[in-house]
Amino acid sequence: MLTDLIPFEHFPGDKSLARRARIKGQKVLYYLLTGYWNTGERLHPFFVTNNYVNHLRVYQYISQFTAGKQALDVGCGVGYGTALLARTAARAVGIDISQKAVNEAFRLYPAGEFLQMDAENMTFPDQSFDVIVSTENFEHLPNQAKHVQELARVVRPDGFCFVATPNPELFVGQNNPFHTKENTYSELRDLLSRCFREVEIVEPTRVPTSPAGKAAHEERFARGEHGTLVTPELEIFGRKVDQTFLSNTHSFHCFARGPVA
């Protein structure tokens, strides 16, 4: 069924040329059948890549915080993450600026709740959601500060927001044309602290290997500018978290609560 997500345990990890060629052929066929073209930036449950696995694991991890809650998924793409959250959330709404992505989300998950909406100008009333998830979306936005303001406006006073976004130290020398800006730890903390009283940022588990990235990482830590490190006793806002699906290799995991009035 289209509404079924493939269990994580069944995801293949084959990176072979043959597999990549097979996936590309499947994408072409799917485009001919549906008119939807799947790119590397817009992942799809029918085309299971390592990148898709990592993205889905973020939703599996964050679902422990959304059970029984009113949840918003910002930049939902074709809706696979929203559909996963909806399994246990009281309500899960997905928004995306692309109408084509929203149409595809409804094709895949016809019972879901998806809206075409700008993340920087959301049309929801104030204090609409308990938990807002904005994963691998922040780096695509032209006005990130406006998005943070919107997160603070739409989240409830006792709720929180989750933002996952790449650590640029791990991508020194690489240029992703789809990314508007990849923020440093200090930039993220500054942006979020303008609108939230409490901010916790969990460091990626992978450390840079390039000389420039490694130097930037070491200098930052030497200045004391770093977030929480992943350990078996990891806590977020004083709550010990289940790390079963934690896949935090390349991105900062930012948690923010207590919107500034």
Image (spheres, rainbow, N blue to C red):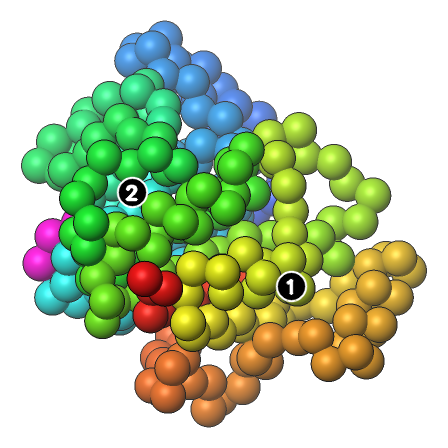
Counting every numbered tag in the picture gives 2
The part of the chain drawn in magenta is 88-92
Give 51 or 169, whichever is nearer the viewer: 169
Q: Amino acid at mark 2?
A: Tyr
Give 219 or 82, whichever is nearer the viewer: 219
- Rendered image: mark on residue 185: 1
Q: Main secondary structure of the magenta part?
A: loop
Label 2 crowd (10 A; few <14 / some 14-19 / many >=20)? many
Label 1 crowd (10 A; few <14 / some 14-19 / many >=20)? many
Q: Which residue is mark 2?
A: 80
Image marks 1 and 2: residues in contact by CB distance under 8 Å: no
User: Is residue 19 located in the magenta-colored stretch of the structure?
Assistant: no
Instruction: Name the residue furthest right.
Output: 211
Q: Where, by quadrant of the figure, is residue 113 drawn?
A: top left
User: Is residue 90 located in the magenta-colored stretch of the structure?
Assistant: yes
Residue 120: tell me if it is visible.
yes
The answer to which of marks 1 and 2 sits earlier in the sequence is 2
